[in-house]
Amino acid sequence: MRSGSSFTGDVFRSHPNSLYLFEPMQYLSQSVGNNEIPYVNGTTRSYDKSQLHEVHAEMIINLLLCRFEDVPFQVFKTSHFLYHNHLGQHYSCSQRIKDSVTGMRQQCIPDLIKKCKGANSFTIKFITVRMQAISIIMKLLPEVHVIHLVRDPRPVLLSQIHVGQIDKTKIENESSSHCKILQNDLAETKENIYQNNFHRQKYEDLAHDPLGQFQGLFNLSGLEFSHAVQNRVKSIAMKKGMMSKCLYCSEKGGAMATSLQWRVSSNYSIVHAIQEQCVNVIDKLGYVLVNSTNDLRNTKISLMKW
């Protein structure tokens, strides 16, 4: 959360005739090990929490191969479909059939499968899926391209405090949890399968050089960096003047200034608490530790170029 994933997904969504899914695994992330899970094909399954990575991998593969009948019913009922208006027709259908699995299978899924099979590109954005699941997918579908979007843990957690996702009085525990997950993801990507079709992308680089960085990502993915896509990058990240104040939308403008705002507006004691828990991750990702309020406001960022 708060690492530019909606921004990045929105740009890939702008590729002509694309299919884009916004967080389709959140339902499974919350339900595996807790609830019986009904599928579009009419079956019901139960899982143990220890199976989460395997379940994520299986369901993501089914999505990528347009096997939507073999995906949980509730995945297609989520309000996240509202975030991409090219699926507005499907969302309306899914709301109309209410809780009818048969209705979903017969009335809504066929059109979605048709759109999937006819799409020029298929992008899925996740924040609840870990790299253990992605490793399984890359072994079975080596043609898949993976972008691991990362951001300095300090502005990530400060932003989560700002929007009310975490309590600043629990910042040590929240920082520890966040950075353990990130550290595990970084360790997983040392596997040989990550030599091809994989790129770790720093959010800070996207914010400071949106056109150059996205051109690199589109080249990696084998997609044309068209004028339509370039214009979408500009409208999201490079607008001047009045900025949007929305918390969760991507179209805010002024990405570079926004990415640096935490350095001049943050309480150093909170920054220091995050650093204490995340020092190894901050170092591995190549960010600079700060030792005072003055350091916080004046430390330069080193950007990577394609």
Image (cartoon, rainbow, N blue to C red):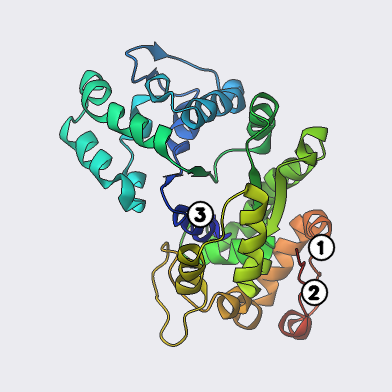
Image position, residue 74 (x, y; %): 34, 30
Which numbered disc covers residue 12? Answer: 3
* Disc 1: which residue: 286
Q: 211 or 184, which is in the foreground?
A: 211
Residue 194 relative to residue 231: left or right? right
Residue at the spot x=46%, y=57% of the render? 10
Q: In terms of secondary structure, where does tag 1 sit?
A: loop
Query: Closer to us: mark 2 or mark 1?
Result: 1
29 vs 163: above or below = above
> Where residue 19 sits: x, y (%)?
42, 43
- The secondary structure type at the circle numbered 2 is loop
Q: Amino acid at mark 2?
A: Val
Please name the amino acid that badge 3 sits on: Phe
Give the image location of residue 216, x and y in percent. 67, 60
* 33 left or right, relative to 284: left
Q: Is residue 128 above or below residue 230?
A: above
Which residue, given by chain and number where applicable, does mark 2 sit on?
A: 290
Residue 159 image position (x, y, % from top left): 55, 66
Q: Is residue 54 left or right of residue 103?
A: right
Within 10 Å of the Cα at label 2, are there few (<14), some (14-19), or many (20+) other Cα atoms?
A: some
Query: Which mark is nearer the camera, 1 or 3?
Result: 3
Q: Is residue 189 visible?
A: no
Rate crowding at label 1 as few (under 14), some (14 to 19) or many (20 or more) other CA atoms within 10 Å. few
Nearer to us in this view, 258 or 177? 258
Mark nearer the N terminus (2 vs 3) = 3
Kindly report the distance in space between the C-alpha atoms of the residues bearing marks 2 and 1: 13 Å
Q: Tell me the quadrant of the picture where the N terminus can be found.
A: bottom right
> Residue sitting at 39 percent across and 69 percent down?
246
Distance of mark 2 from mark 3, alpha carbons? Answer: 34 Å
Q: CA–CA distance between discs 1 and 3?
A: 26 Å
